[in-house]
Image (cartoon, helix red, strand yellow):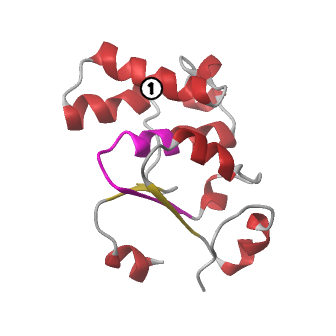
Amino acid sequence: MLEFKLTQENYSLVSSKIPLILSLNIVENIALIKEVHIGLSVDKAEGIAKESLEKIGLLDIALMSIDKCSDLEIFYVMFIRALMMNRGTILVESPYLILEEIINIEILDELNQDKDIIILDTFENETKYEDYRCNIIR
């Protein structure tokens, strides 16, 4: 996986190695990217964050702390946070290190408008992607 990441440019990473900030609520975690990297106001950045959560039916967790969310909710929030970056590709590194349940890849497509999504995982987890249309590179 490391070799693959080294060949990529212009990407945001969703990884267990880049956790959410515990002292911030969900919306603040997402909005922080737009505030710091792009210079949006807090209100505008949080509005964009809430719109993204609403797209996948998670607006009800917007003001929750991270410790009140499920692993799956945290994963989707991490993905939304990566979308907030002005990068052309999102690399999702070993999603099953973040969560135990199977992710709905179609939800990632609902959130994403124009970025390439690449999921990096181990062969042991290959069967978890069987029901989805996705290319598996060996």
Residue 81, above or below 29: below
- Quarter holding the C terminus is bottom right
85 inside magenta stretch:
yes
**Which amino acid type is marked by label 1?**
Ala
- Location of residue 57 in the rendering, given as x and y in whole percent from the top left corner: 67, 26
Q: Between residues 98 and 125, which one lies in front from this camera angle?
A: 125
Above-or-below relation of 124 to 119: below
- Return the x and y of residue 110 as percentages of the image width and height: 59, 40
In reply to whether residue 2 is colored magenta, the answer given is no
Residue lying at the far top in this picture: please name it. 43
Residue at the spot 61% in from the left edge and 31% down from the top edge = 67
> Magenta span covers which residues?
79-93
Query: Mark 1 highlights which residue?
Result: 49
Which residue is outermost to the bottom?
Answer: 138
Expressed as whole percent of the image width and height from the top left, the position of residue 116 reads: 45, 58
In the displayed structure, does residue 16 sit left or right of residue 132?
A: left
Classify residue 72 as left or right of residue 1. Answer: right
Q: Residue at 64% across / 26% down in the picture?
A: 58
Total number of numbered labels? 1
At 65% across and 43% down in the image, what residue appears? 107
Tell me residue 22's x, y (percent): 47, 33
**Element under disc 1:** helix
Count residues near mark 1 (Cα–Cα under 10 Å), then give few for <14, some for 14-19, many for 20+.
Answer: many
Instruction: Answer yes or no: is residue 69 visible.
Output: yes
Residue plotted at (63% across, 60% down): 97
The answer, for residue 25, to whether it is visible in the render is no
Instruction: Decide which of 2, 53 is in the foreground and name it.
Output: 53
The quarter holding residue 37 reads top left
